[in-house]
Image (tube, helix red, strand yellow):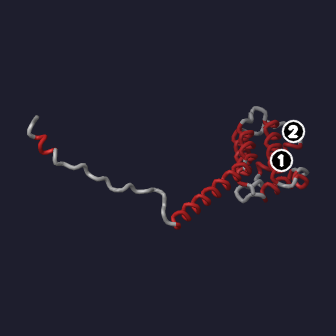
Amino acid sequence: MSKNNILLKTLIDPTLPPSVDFYPETVGWKLVLVIVFIASASVMVRFLRRYRSNRYRRTALKAIRRLSKADAKTYLMTINSILKQVACYRYPHTSVASLYDEQWLMFLTSQTKDCDFTTPIARLWQRRLYTPQPNNEWTSSDLMQLESMACDWIKYHR
């Protein structure tokens, strides 16, 4: 054996300090833990309720995004139909379903502060829905503006 082993014979194994328990020992920390758990659970429940209650908005926005702008008349009618369905779902059916033209535009404008349906393009949109005139005067930018107005209304109505 080497001479270095003699020095190691007198060494004693170090004692480990007692482990720190992660479970709180005082009532105050338990109370804080319960309050944090209840608060996070209530926030999660509120988030889930809001997410579920806005499902109709997500569905309507997806339907608008899938629309083809090839036929302007069909596009205009479908936008109107989607807005009517959203409004009938959100508001009392008897008061919304019978609205059309200027009354319909005023209703849409009154239900949000972020979207104005009293613009000339919105009025032209409603006139063209109920008249048998050709819709070849609609440009793609007009259709995009109308789509933007409809999407904004769906997102931000009360």
Q: Position of residue 140 (x, y in %)?
A: 70, 38
**Is residue 124 in view from this perspective?**
no
Between the C-alphas of marks 2 and 1, the distance is: 23 Å
Which residue is depicted at the point 84% across and 36% down? 134
Helix or strand or loop: what does disc 1 sit on?
A: helix
Q: Amino acid at mark 2?
A: Gln
Q: Where 131 falls versus 120 (above or below)?
A: above
- Look at label 1 and name its amino acid: Lys
Q: Identify which residue, 140 or 110, lies in the foreground.
A: 110
Give the side of residue 151 with respect to residue 95, left or right.
Answer: left
- Circle 1 packing at 10 Å, graded few (<14), some (14-19), many (20+), is many
Tag nearer the camera, 2 or 1? 1
Which of the image's four quarters has the C terminus? bottom right
12 relative to 81 in the view: left or right:
left
When asked about the image quadrant of residue 72, the answer is: top right
Which residue is at a point 61% across and 60% down the rendered structure image?
Answer: 39
Earlier-in-chain disc, 2 versus 1: 1
Residue 109 appears at what percent x and percent y? Answer: 77, 57
Write down the residue under mark 1: 84
Position of residue 8 relative to residue 115, above or below, is above
Residue in the foreground of this view, choosing between 126 and 99: 99
Query: Which label belongs to residue 148?
Result: none
Element carrying mark 2: loop
Q: In the current view of this chain or complex, which residue is farthest to the top? A: 70
Q: Residue at x 91, y 51 (%)?
A: 98
